[in-house]
Amino acid sequence: MTKIDDIDTLIRPNIRNLKPYRSARDDFDKGILLDANENSLGAPMRHNQNLHRYPSPTQNELRKKIAKFRHVLMENIFTGVGSDEAIDLLIRIFCEPGKDAILITPPTYGMYKVSAAINDVKVVESQLNREFQPDVESILGKADKNTKILFLCSPNNPTANDLKRTELLKLVELFPGIVVVDEAYIDFSEQESMAAVVPQYPNLVVLQTFSKAFGLAGIRLGVAISSPPVINYMLKIKAPYNVNQLTAETALEAFNHMDLINFNIDKIREERDYLVEQLSHAPTVEKVYPTNANFILFKIKDAQNIYRQLAEKGIIVRYRGNEPGCQDCLRVTVGMPNENLRFLKTLKEITS
Ligand SMILES: Cc1ncc(COP(=O)(O)O)c(C=O)c1O
């Protein structure tokens, strides 16, 4: 098991020794503010929102709010420009370009590989098994001292299923590096978030986002939940004002609307289950995979052709047939009830 003292040994030496950028706002944020070369006369509009000022570099108020909601401490929370920023920062903190590697479990979210490639970091793959669960033995067999981060995604994109909690826990215990569990879709699932065990495992990083269940993809806010050493390194290397004022205010406001957020989650689950049932009875659909997310993966004869025909009729889904284990598969997001009906009707027209 990776101990808290081991985290430092996993960090790239240049990051460990980095002297971070500091602004006067790290120390003072009240008074006559003549420190940051802002436009003191104000923004051209939305005067009450202080938009002529740089936002908080630490976002403590927002981090506290998220921490309370996820039952952890502010010191366990990093906020970034989408979880995509967190993925990139983690690779930059732990992986030496041209030397180190990340381990991914295809079929999975595409950005882990892209971020690794941007950073000249190798990618080792251990395919999910036929039930789209991780093969713990294969993963551990492929890990060595240069395989710094294991990326897991639960519920997994594009397959939509939860990775079993027992397997996730085994991997967090046994993987000799950082284990990232990307929980972008966790609020649609019944499985408990791995955030609950962050205090026990200093090498665990849980990623969450405001883009899915919170319905706020447009504000670009992602969250990493981890041990304070990992969070401190993320804060150390991020751009000084990564989360902007409008994003922070909108996210804080969202917490006043939890009733609607929860209502919409229930509605999406209901619509999802309806879509699953309807797709299961559709004649050319060969398989509908179990889903714990706000989308569905299904196998259909001649998937690429169906994908194109749907698009010609104005219904855009995602062709996932090129992903390992997903031959002839399409991924469809749960839409508005009328959109779901249109999708089902159009699919029926194309295939009958
Ligand atoms: C598994 C997974 N992680 C992360 C993201 C990106 O999230 P964000 O919008 O917070 O960058 C997505 C987006 O589709 C995703 O599917």
Image (tube, helix red, strand yellow):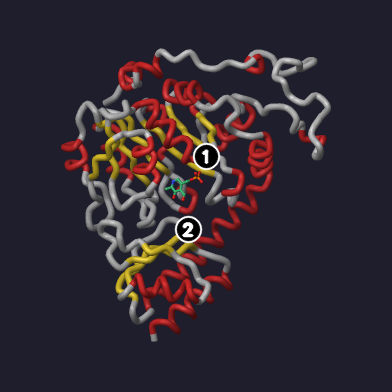
Which SS class for mark 2?
loop
Left or right of 225 on screen, residue 203: left
Residue 9 at what x, y percent from top left?
Answer: 31, 18
What amino acid is labelled 1 in the image? Gly
Q: Which residue lies at the image location 44% right of the left edge and 52% below the top edge?
A: 189
Residue mark closest to the camera, 1 vs 2: 1
Q: Which residue is mark 1?
A: 222
What amino acid is labelled 2 in the image? Asn
Q: Residue furthest bottom?
A: 352
Residue 200 at what x, y percent from top left?
Answer: 37, 27
The quadrant in which residue 292 appears is bottom left
Left or right of 73 on screen, residue 159: left
Residue 256 vertical position relative to residue 8 in the rendered view, above or below: below
Q: Which residue lies at the image location 51% right of the left edge and 16% below the top edge?
A: 20
Left or right of 109 on screen, residue 315: right
Which quadrant does the C terminus fall into?
bottom left
Mark 1 in CB contact with mark 2 (< 8 angstroms):
no
Which SS class for mark 1?
strand
Residue 77 vertical position relative to residue 105 in the rendered view, above or below: above
Residue 97 at what x, y percent from top left?
Answer: 32, 28
The residue carrying mark 1 has its beta carbon less than 8 Å from ligand 1? yes
Residue toward you, 81 or 226:
81
Q: For the image shown, how many numbered marks are present on the structure?
A: 2
First in sequence: mark 1 vs mark 2: 1
At label 2, counting other C-alpha atoms closer than 10 Å, the crowd grade (few under 14, some 14-19, many 20 or more) is many
Q: Which residue is mark 2?
A: 294
